[in-house]
Amino acid sequence: MALPRAYQASFTPSEVEFIASDEKIKIIPKTKLPRLQFIQGTYGPFLPPLATEVPIWLALLMKKNNKCSIICPDWLNIDFLKKRQEEEEKEQEFSNLPFHYMELSQMLLDAAPDDIPNAEQIHKILQDLQETREAKAREGFKALDDKWLGMNNLSFMEINKIRPFFSLAFNEMRKLNLADKNQSEEDLQNHTFH
């Protein structure tokens, strides 16, 4: 899907990650801090060892500066991800994962592997899960028509990856079907008047 940027109807992976970084996550502060005011909101006060909820971008910044530990999200564990992988392999539908699971897991595994139990195993399971879902999406394109494509439970990054191809293919199929319809109407008119 290496279309020139001018033809892409999608975000870059960095833009998707930026959007996902507004998702909330719980942290345990390591130092006492007052309320922090930002354009999008106020967070804190931060009182160790009490957990508090902040956007991912703030959690990652605080983690980088050794000001907090990140509480691993419930879905970012071996049992949950293995169950989703099994569903992907058995079911036709996509399994239900958080909308930003790809971006969030990547950010957390990169910046806070020490806060994620079994981080290496989770990374491997996530890779397998993403490959399975990509294969399933490619299968879904076989049923592509110019009216509807149903793929429920895709994540934002997955939608973003297929959007340029789907948009281009969808528009081309609509043009072809419109040309076929116009040709059929023209043929019908020619047969009617002769």
Image (cartoon, rainbow, N blue to C red):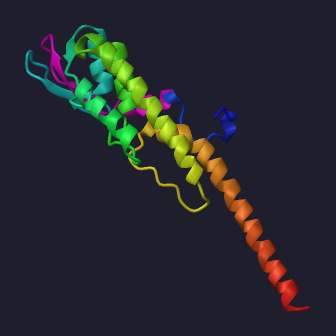
Residue range corresponding to the magenta coloring: 14-38
Q: Percent position (x, y) of residue 18?
A: 42, 29
> Could you tell me if residue 77 is visible in this image?
no
Residue in the image at 32% along x and 32% along y: 39
Q: Is residue 189 left or right of residue 21?
A: right
Quadrant hosting residue 20 = top left
Q: Quadrant of the C terminus?
A: bottom right
Q: Percent position (x, y) of residue 26?
A: 19, 26
> Could you tell me if residue 22 is visible in this image?
yes
Vertical side of 115 occupied by 183: above or below: below
Residue in the image at 37% along x and 35% along y: 100
Quadrant hosting residue 75 = top left
Residue in the image at 37% along x and 42% along y: 90
Residue in the image at 83% along x and 85% along y: 189
Q: Quadrant of the N terminus?
A: top right
Q: Percent position (x, y) of residue 22?
A: 33, 32
Vertical side of 25 occupied by 62: above or below: above
Q: Is residue 170 left or right of residue 102?
A: right
* Residue farthest along the front direction in this orientation: 90
Query: Toward the viewer: 185 or 100?
Result: 185
Magenta span includes 78 = no
